Image (cartoon, rainbow, N blue to C red):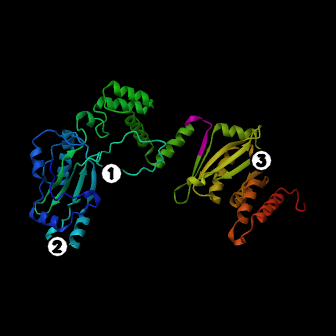
Amino acid sequence: MAADDDVGDMGEGGDVADEEEDADDAEGSSDVDESAEESSSRELVTVESSSRELVTVVCPEKVHASWDAWVQYFTGYCERTMQVLPVKETMSRAERNKRVLRSKKGYDDSLLLPAGIDPYQRTYICTHGWKKRKSRGEGSRPRQYIRLTDCPFRYVIQWNVAKNSLQVKRGNFVHNHPVSARAFATYPSSRGLDSATVSARVEGMLAVGARRSRIYDYLLEHDQNVLQVDVDNMVRAHTASIVGGDDNEATARGLAGFAAADKENVSSVADTAAGETGVISLATAHMRRLYSRFSELLLVDCTHKTNRYNYQLLTFMTMNEFGEGAVVQHSLLEANGDWHMDKAITHFKRLHPARIKLLRVIMVDKDMNEIRVLESHFPEARVLICHFHVIKYLKEMRSKPEFGKISSDDAVQIDACIHKLVYADSDIS
């Protein structure tokens, strides 16, 4: 099939605001080529080529009243002709008017698009017509499904100012690959569920957490055009619909479920003066029993490995009979401040009113805020700083630029002094 003489590659920049096209808009001469119009009365036509068989398809209607009318027509056109036609490029009204004003006919206001007409044009291509991109992979997992055939099919739907309507222009309605019902059924846009009963049944299976393989087998038994990846997408969309609600409602549901799981589970929520949630503290029945057995030692660590996730987690731990750390409370903090620490400690003391007086040693990291608040709540306990955090802190201070650049040998000697200082038995040793 022969294309128009003025066919241009809209995919390499989409510059349609040249003077020739402005003249076309003014005169209303943006018609589809005659050969395409003749093919509109025929079904699919196979044209023999020296390298590959070309398939000519029915071209769309040339004139449409609005973009809404075009979208409605376009959906039916793709289904009737068994094509998948994505939008490659879109030119907005603002960009079109900007290009006209820069041209030699910029003085003619009649060429400018009025308000309410947006976009100005769209370029459609075949789904097999995308340009092949250079892969960033190393080839260890090669792609299994490659649909790119450099298909020449393309056309432009453009607003004609003179005729005040949309017109199909510069069409090349030829494919270099088979166009059939069997091929059309393999595209993702063609697959899916076509039965309301089956859809309702699948929703029920997703709600009860049915396995994906079972859902897939059920759909195949009912002659649904789906693949395993479609079932994966259904499960993913269902999960997103559940967790995509309001955060406050999800938090409230989580706390309610936490309390309902065991009557000895305890949680508390402390609000700030601004009415925002400041601290959420949680302690399970198992955590409470652990501290009731081992009440002499308390390990406190704030934001342990959670800074990277942008939230503050305060953890209280004790040490069991095997010398292992065991969590006895979690508190999620809005910020690492005195007020937030005070609310978390108050929750902990309320859970253990009788055993809290047995606490003798509290181990913390280098955070001075934690030490100050803990000493005010537990005046009889001795607050110790973890050796690991002290050594880490001193090494970080040693490497700061304000202390000057030191050699590797000096750094080793300073680190040795730091270890001796931390592990010294007394001030004079």
- The relative height of residue 282 versus residue 93 in the rendered view (above or below) is above
Q: Quadrant of residue 56?
A: top left
- Residue drawn 10% across the image and 60% down it: 29
Residue density around tag 1, few if under 14, some if 14–19, many if 20 or more, within 10 Å = few
Query: Is 230 placed left or right of 33 in the picture?
Result: right
Q: Nearer the viewer, mark 2 or mark 1?
A: 1
Question: In this view of the protein, can residue 121 be seen by the observer?
Answer: yes
Q: Quadrant of the C terminus?
A: bottom right
- Residue drawn 26% across the image and 65% down it: 95
Residue hosting label 3: 359
Residue density around tag 2, few if under 14, some if 14–19, many if 20 or more, within 10 Å = some
Residue 142 percent coordinates (x, y): 44, 42
User: Which amino acid type corresponds to the residue marked 2 in the rendered image?
Assistant: Lys
Circles 2, 1 touching at the beta carbon (< 8 Å): no
Residue hosting label 1: 131
Q: Earlier in the sequence, mark 3 or mark 2?
A: 2
Residue 358 percent coordinates (x, y): 78, 45
Residue hosting label 2: 105
Query: Is 300 placed left or right of 279 in the picture?
Result: right
- The relative height of residue 105 versus residue 305 in the rendered view (above or below) is below
Q: Secondary structure at mark 2?
A: loop
Residue 198 percent coordinates (x, y): 32, 29
Magenta part of the protein: which range?
A: 260-267
- The relative height of residue 161 versus residue 378 in the rendered view (above or below) is below
